[in-house]
Image (spheres, rainbow, N blue to C red):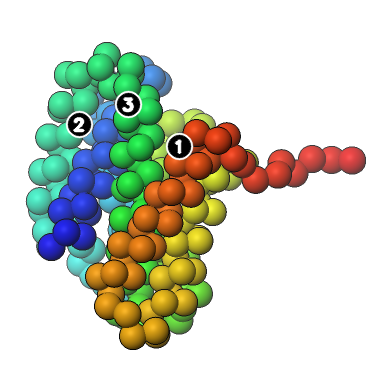
């Protein structure tokens, strides 16, 4: 139940970040809705297609579409407020990354995927939508920059598959792994942690 609530919260937050990218790129309302949609459900859609879980989740449960549309409208109306509260968006995005990573790993394991494949599905669920958004907006995707983002999702996914066979309840594992992703992302934001850049010479 808690994970379901956080899932919708993460969907809303990711949709808001997508809409704000559209605002900064001076796109129209439809462009904002497109970026909000792909950010919120893009990664999960690719995950479901790879796992053979069709129709994909938002087709069978249209509450996701409703949440995305409402969030996009509220974000555009309050775009000046959102622009001034950058760190609130970053914090919320970090929480969404953690929750989506756990959901991706859990779903992959449910479909019988190997542990490493499950980790990849977790990263894809958490970071895939942002990659699509950035490509559409003409930006270098965050996961390809030196900033710690996908790395946090990888760490959380690895912890999940490591604990999965320990006999600990899945609820506790989910909370622990989402927390690890969240904390790593916060450290990256506030302590300016990053991966080494790849340079010539």
- Indicate the position of residue 43 as horizontal and vertical percent values: 36, 54
Q: Is residue 115 above or below residue 36?
A: below
Q: Quadrant of the C terminus?
A: top right
For label 1, the SS is helix
- Indicate the position of residue 21 as horizontal and vertical percent values: 37, 27
Quadrant of the rendered structure where residue 137 is? top left
Give the spatial CA distance, label 1 vs label 2. Answer: 17 Å
Q: Which residue is mark 3?
A: 20
Quadrant of the rendered structure where residue 57 is? bottom left
Q: How many marks?
A: 3
For marks 2 and 3, the one nearer the N-term is: 3
Q: Is residue 8 above or below residue 194?
A: below
Viewer-closest of 20 and 158: 158
- Indicate the position of residue 121 as horizontal and vertical percent values: 41, 66
Q: Is residue 54 left or right of residue 180?
A: left
Q: Is residue 123 left or right of residue 196?
A: left
Viewer-closest of 43 and 180: 180
Q: Which residue is mark 1?
A: 134
Quadrant of the rendered structure where residue 104 is? bottom left
What residue appears at the point 21 percent right and 41 percent down from the top-left corner? 12
What residue appears at the point 65 percent right and 45 percent down from the top-left corner? 195
Q: Residue furthest top?
A: 80
Give the spatial CA distance, label 1 vs label 3. Answer: 12 Å
Q: Is residue 46 left or right of residue 29?
A: right
Q: Is residue 9 above or below residue 160?
A: above
Residue 182, which numbered label? none
Viewer-closest of 156 and 8: 156
Q: Which residue is mark 2?
A: 72
Give the spatial CA distance, label 2 vs label 3. Answer: 9 Å
Mark 2 touches mark 3? (CB < 8 Å) = no
For marks 1 and 3, the one nearer the N-term is: 3
């Amino acid at each position: 139940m808690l994970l379901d609530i956080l899932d919708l919260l993460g969907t809303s937050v990711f949709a808001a970040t997508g809409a704000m990218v559209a605002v900064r790129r001076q796109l129209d309302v439809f462009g904002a809705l497109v970026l909000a949609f792909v950010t919120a459900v893009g990664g999960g859609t690719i995950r479901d297609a790879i796992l053979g879980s069709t129709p994909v989740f938002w087709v069978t449960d249209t509450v996701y579409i409703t949440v995305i549309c409402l969030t996009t409208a509220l974000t555009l109306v309050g775009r000046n407020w959102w622009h001034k509260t950058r760190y609130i968006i970053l914090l919320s995005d970090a929480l969404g990354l953690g929750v989506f990573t756990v959901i991706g790993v859990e779903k992959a394991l449910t479909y019988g995927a190997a542990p490493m494949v499950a980790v990849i599905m977790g990263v894809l669920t958490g970071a895939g939508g942002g990659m699509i958004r950035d490509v559409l907006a003409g930006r270098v995707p965050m996961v390809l920059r030196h900033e710690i983002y996908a790395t946090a999702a990888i760490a959380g996914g690895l912890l999940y598959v490591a604990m999965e066979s320990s006999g600990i309840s899945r609820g506790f594992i989910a909370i622990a792994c989402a927390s690890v992703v969240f904390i790593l992302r916060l450290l990256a934001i506030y302590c300016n942690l990053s991966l080494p850049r790849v340079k010539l010479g």
